[in-house]
Image (cartoon, grey):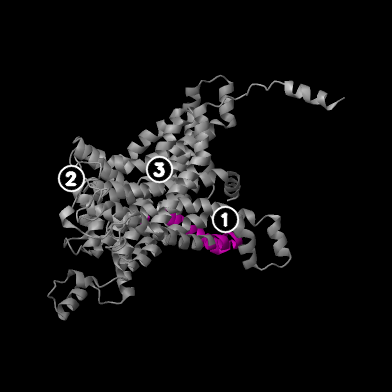
Amino acid sequence: MSPVDVSAPASAVEMPAPLLVVPRWARARRRWRVLGKPAFGLLIGALLGLCTLAPGWIAPTSPIDQDLSTRLQPPIWMEGGTARHPLGSDALGRDVYSRVVFGARTTFLVALASTALGGAAGAALGLIAGYHGGALDQLVRKLIDMQLAFPYLLLAISVLAVAGRSVPVLIAVLALSSWPAFARIVRGEVRSLRERQFIESARAIGCPDRRILITHLLPGVSASLCVVWSFDLARVVVLESSLSFLGLGVQPPTPSWGMDLSDSRQFLQIAYWTVLFPGLAISLVVLAANLVGDWVRDVLDPIVKRGRAGA
Amino acid sequence: MKRLGQIAWGLGHLLVVMLGTASLVFVVLRLSGDPAMMVAPPQATVEDLQAIRRELGLDRPMAAQYVDFLEKLAVGDLAQSFRYRRPALEVLGERVGATVQLALAAQLLAIAAAIPLGIAAALRRDSWLDAGLTGFVTLGQSIPHFWLGLMAIVVFGVHLGWLPTSGRGGWANLILPALTLSAYSMASLTRLTRSSILEVLGADYIRTARAKGLGTWPVLFKHALKNALIPVVTLTGLQLGVLLSGAVVVETVFAWPGIGRLTVEAIHARDYPLVQAGVVFMALLFVVVNQGVDLCYRWLDPRTAGSER
């Protein structure tokens, strides 16, 4: 048999018709799920990062300069709009575009700091409670249940009303709302992981608890932490802007999306752009964080499911 | 006997949560500045301030104030509102109706829309309808209440002029606030209904029902729905927290005279007794409804009746 004989029938074999015909739009949807979601998230994330690090590059106008001669100017595409204020100006003549760009820093840094703080605390509590079990575990579980069920905005409102408006207090209040989600998922996963052989082996060779928790258990829950973190980021951005909207967020003149919405509310009837753009920015950031969360969860689905099944 | 035990356990849980909430609110509010400064007129002297403190009971030790607060709470006496000069509970009572009306309308809207939409998306899985609904769900969960409300005012109130945008009055006044408040719940409930129906439709007993020749609708209504809706009922209850938090914001946007807006106003006016009463009251409302949902849940799913979660 020559090699030619082998290759000839192979090329002559007809490909069987595909069993399942996937419609073109379904493929497009799949592409969106696999590529579109992270791309969108990355784009918004990059924009946020740019706005946070160097807002002056993309918004040359100062966000706090007032000019009462050009108050409530419409955006550039409307009659009376000028290039000086591409998205219009607010009731004090401040540039809406600059306020949106500079406001990103407030939102982004506050959300990052509070989810990092709350996430670290929640993960630590979840690790310890899940690993050791017992009375501590019961206590953590009760705390999680109580807090997840409570209308947290109310509590945040009362704390901020009393402690005063400042960035550290705001971050603390938001972090306090973050920890239960992290603690719950980490606790559940650790409870199933700790029964596995590698943990048993580590214990058998005399590995100290702290080392087991940090080098053996933490990597195992990091995937789910990513999922919880992106959803929590979205939640915290909404909570922060809600608090700012109610007048309990950062202090002026720091630009903040929620505060801009609240300041411009009374001009809604005559100057909708003062409200449209800051809110659009909030919604886009929340949407991006949610989509990235969805995407990571889809990618990690088996891992996350296994963790849940053991919870 | 078992059922009685469960009810007793539920009541105990309720008391603990109430006590915890009340204590937290008390501590938080007292850690702040001096409430006497807020009620006193600007030209008040030191003696005036002391008189006010004595009158409000603020000169006594913190522990005594706390015990006093709990004792009064137990009999429903939530101090006088500084601003209204009337019992805080009375002021709250006048506004509760508005919040309950808004929250109920929003929740009913959400359920009425979400269950059919979720079923439709599940039955036509991977269709255009499903894809479109999934998109709406993601949007609905991402747009904050207050912005949605403001945009609804711009579109339906200002530009189209169809609906009133502030205050409480006829049914027309209720439409925009209720729709705004329902958006988030509607989105989450639709998503949950869809996934829950899909899960149930894959179960063996559904295959059996199919195999004996039942059509889609009888299978859906006689066999699938009751089981598929269990998680939906649970979420409906849990969402009350979201709803109450949302109500605070939505009431502020639409000038709806409910307890959420009252509490926010009280914060800005530093009317502590009223803030305290507002938060404790909403917490109580919340815990009571959640226990109710828990009982419903046990009735829907007898498997959980015996086990403590």
Between A104 and A119, the one nearer to me in the picture:
A104
> Which residue is at the far right?
A1
Q: Is residue B67 above or below residue B165?
A: below
Q: Quadrant of residue B296?
A: top left
Q: Residue at x 55, y 56 (%)?
A: A186
Badge 2: how crowded within 10 Å, few (<14), some, or many (20+)? Answer: few
Can you tell which quarter of the image residue A195 is in?
bottom right
Cβ–Cβ under 8 Å for marks 3 and 1: no
What residue is shown with label 2? A270
Q: Where's residue A307, x and y in %?
A: 59, 50
Tell me how far mark 3 sits from mark 1, CA to CA: 31 Å
Q: Which residues are magenta?
A: A124-153
Residue type at mark 3: give it. Thr
Magenta segment includes A205: no
Q: Comparing marks 2 and 3, which lies closer to the viewer?
A: 2
Determine whether the residue tagged by mark 1 lies in a helix, strand or loop.
helix
The secondary structure that dominates the magenta segment is: helix
Q: Magenta span has A135? A: yes
Chain letter, disc 1 residue: A
Q: Position of residue A18 (x, y in %)?
A: 63, 24
Q: Secondary structure at mark 2?
A: loop
The chain ID associated with circle 3 is B
What chain does mark 2 sit on?
A
Q: Residues within 10 Å of mark 1 (few under 14, many from 20)?
A: few
- Residue at horizontal 50 percent and vertical 45 percent from the top: A38
- Asked if residue B238 lies left or right of residue B195, the reply is left
Marking on residue A222: 1
In the depicted structure, whether residue B30 falls above or below residue A155: below
The disc, 2 or 1, on the residue closer to the chain's N-terminal end is 1
Q: Residue at x 22, y 63 (%)?
A: B271
Q: Nearer the viewer, residue B134 or A182?
A: B134
